[in-house]
Image (spheres, rainbow, N blue to C red):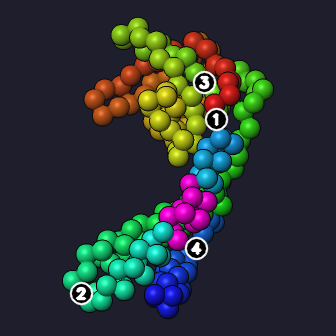
Amino acid sequence: MAACLEHAAATLETTVHGDVGGGMPTPITRKGYEALKAELDRLHKVERPRVIEAIAEARAHGDLSENAEYDAAKERQGFIEARLAELKGKLADARIIDIAGRVSETVVFGATVVLIEQEAQEKKQYTLVGQDEADLKYSRISVQSPVGRALIGKRVGDVVEVTTPAKVVEYEVMEIRFEEL
C-alpha cells in the first residue's frame, strides 16, 4: 500500500505543469484574493492528499479496468489539479485593489453604486468587484460585466445605457460610495 501511495503522489506531482500567470493584471479586492488563496491551500493541503489516498486504496483492490472507485478518484484528481492550476494563474495575475477609505467622484473598481433604472424607476445597488468575486445575490457585479463596464468613469447624475439581450436599459447614477466588503 505504501508503494501505491508513493506512486499516486508521484503521478499527482507530474500531472500539471502548465504556464501559470502571465496574463493581464486582474483587479481583485483583498478579501477576494484571500478567498482564492484559502481555496488553493485547502485543495493543496486537504483535498489533494485525500484523493491520493483514495487512488492508492482503490489500486489495492486489484483490477483497475472495472474499478469504479479508482475511476472516480482519478476523475476527482483531474478536477483538483485543473482547479489548482486555474487558481495559481488567477493569483499570479491578481492585482489587489485596496478600497478601504477610498474616495472618488467617479465610479471605479470597488465602488458601491446606487442607480435608478429609468423606465421602471427602480432603485438598484451594485458593488463593482473582480470577476471571481461577483455574486448577484450580494449585489456584487464584475467590473467586466456589461453593467460594470458601462458604469466605470461615470459620476453622480450621469445616465448610463446598458445593452442587454432583451433591450437597452438606462440607469441614472444616484450615489457613489466605498464600503468594506
Residues tagged 4 and 2 counted as in contact (Cβ below 8 A): no
- Residue range (magenta): 39-49
Marks 4 and 2, Cα distance to the nearest angstrom? 32 Å
- Residue under label 3: 112
Q: Earlier in the sequence, mark 4 or mark 2?
A: 4
Instruction: Name the main secondary structure of what is drawn in magenta.
Output: helix
Residue 109, label in figure: 1
117 lies left or right of 172: left
User: Is residue 52 depicted above or below 163 in this figure?
Assistant: below
Work out which residue is located at the far top of the displayed protein and give it.
121
Residue 19, label in figure: 4
Residues tagged 3 and 2 counted as in contact (Cβ below 8 A): no
Marks 4 and 3, Cα distance to the nearest angstrom? 35 Å
Q: Give me the residue at 41% from left, 74% from top.
A: 54
Q: Earlier in the sequence, mark 3 or mark 2?
A: 2
Residue 129, label in figure: none
Q: Nearer the viewer, residue 74 or 116?
A: 74
The amino acid pointed to by label 1 is: Phe
Q: Give me the residue at 56% from left, 54% from top.
A: 39
